[in-house]
Image: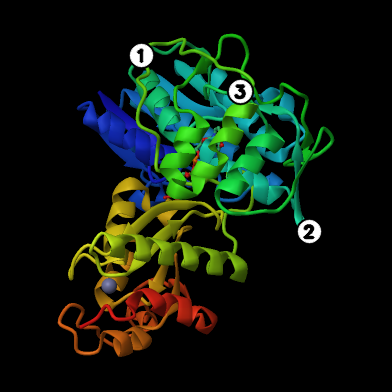
Amino acid sequence: MKIVVVGASGLIGAKTTERLRKKGHEVVPASRSSGVNTITGEGLATALKGADVVLDVSNSPSFEDKAVMEFFDASTRNLLAAGATAGVKHHVALGVVGTEELQGSGYFRAKLVQENLIKSGGIPYTIVQATQFFEFIGGIAQAGAAGDTVQVSTAYMQPIAADDVADAVSAICLEPPINGTIEIAGPERFRQNEIVEMYLRAIGDSRPVVGSEDASYFGVKLAEQSLVPGANGRASSTKFDKWLKASLGLLIAICLSFVSSVVHAQVKWINADYTAEPPCGGGMRLAMAEKSNDMTHAQMILHIRAANEVAKEWKTFGHHPFGAVLVGPDNQQILMKQGNISVVRHAETELARRAAEAYGSGYLSKCTLVTTMEPCVMCSGNIYFANIGKVVFGATEEALGKLTGTSKMNPTMNLPCRQVFDAGQKSIQVTGPFPELEEELIEPHKGFWK
Ligand SMILES: NC(=O)c1ccc[n+]([C@@H]2O[C@H](COP(=O)([O-])OP(=O)(O)OC[C@H]3O[C@@H](n4cnc5c(N)ncnc54)[C@H](OP(=O)(O)O)[C@@H]3O)[C@@H](O)[C@H]2O)c1
Ligand SMILES: [Zn+2]
């Protein structure tokens, strides 16, 4: 089958592309980064030629009311017109559970326009409405930030792992169109304030979470059940605690008992076709919050310390004491951790390679690689080609050189990463060094280099 994935460089797009390819289908990735623009129509006819299925998992680059409406309206019209010309047999699109009830929000008004265009567009279709991705909980917390507290709704949520969304959506692409809507959700129900609190505690954020039934959810006051699926919703298998554990590693142990005490409902799989996949590494999405924002100084310190913990942990296994972490676009969630493997597999190089394999390049442009020591020229090159947008480092390569000296174990160079990035064709935002952290970053290196 030939399947065009619109938004293939995004969180769900990259995961569905991988799944459908593994099943042996011809998958055409379509997004601006691969030369297809659904707004201008560039590349659309060529991409859709001979396609059986169009899967639309794109999202608007801007969430401002007018911009998001223009995006979903124009993009959906263009996709349907090109699909009709190409003889597409099934149009599958990803929507959000509760869209009809959330019309106080510009984003959901645009999502409803998208759905209505599809319903009246003449191409057989399936709309898959998903609940909030686990990867989006940080975005909800960020949107609710008010002074030193986080204020969110007490309404119920039944969030789902992005990996489970990708499983469900890719399976639906291979089924006949139903000309209707399928709701998918996670296996557990939480109150929004409870899950936000669990998430924040897990990432070491101690801000009090204040739950209120009047709190706004992206401009809308939620009813208790606004965000949860109806009786026919399909539930996936990955539980929040498992996902947290996989995503955040050690930090999580503390919140597990809390998680199990606030689960309100268990929902069984309705469709046995969806297999339970291991919990995802997860990419943080900020579907409705500002997509590109700056990491605060406090967040940088927190993440550099997390990278230093990785360095210390890997040292205990006999590796060189370097560590790096990949932080999602919400500047909070640690998506991946990596220690040093060998003289050619530095922590940052290895992390950038793993990130490039796991996530789309568009998504990585909004992520930050945080490392204890300034990336060397080899690592900077990998960060550049992986399209990671931002770098934060603790101590300079020059300071590291003083520690490693002439040790053959690490023949440190002195070529600032900014100089390497400056030679490239795109800008990478670099922050560092942090002299106030130098002492603690040097600690694991003391007596190590011979
Ligand atoms: N976040 C949640 O909790 C949640 C829950 C339920 C449903 N959803 C829905 O899931 C869908 C996918 O979300 P996501 O988080 O995976 O999206 P995402 O990571 O933000 O990816 C968006 C994709 O759209 C592409 N795109 C943007 N403008 C384009 C254009 N003019 N032409 C072609 N492609 C374009 C981007 O690629 P380029 O930049 O390369 O163009 C990217 O591949 C959204 O429709 C959202 O409403 C989200
Ligand atoms: Zn390096």
The numbered mark at residue 167 is: none
In-image side of 437 versus 90 (left or right): right
**Position of residue 3 measured from the top left corner of the image (x, y, whole percent):** 31, 29
Q: Is residue 385 visible?
A: no
Q: Nearer the viewer, residue 72 or 382?
A: 382
Label 2 CB-ligand 1 distance < 8 A: no
The numbered mark at residue 116 is: 3
What residue is at 64 percent from the left and 21 percent from the top?
264
**What's the residue type where badge 2 is placed?**
Gly
The numbered mark at residue 147 is: 2
Q: Nearer the viewer, residue 438 or 138?
A: 438
What residue is at 50 percent from the left and 15 percent from the top?
234
What residue is at 36 percent from the left and 45 percent from the top?
43
Does residue 323 sit above or below 445 in this rendering?
above
The numbered mark at residue 273 is: 1
Q: Quadrant of the N terminus?
A: top left
What residue is at 29 percent from the left and 77 percent from the top?
376
Pointer 1 or 3: first along the chain = 3
Pointer 2 or 1: first along the chain = 2
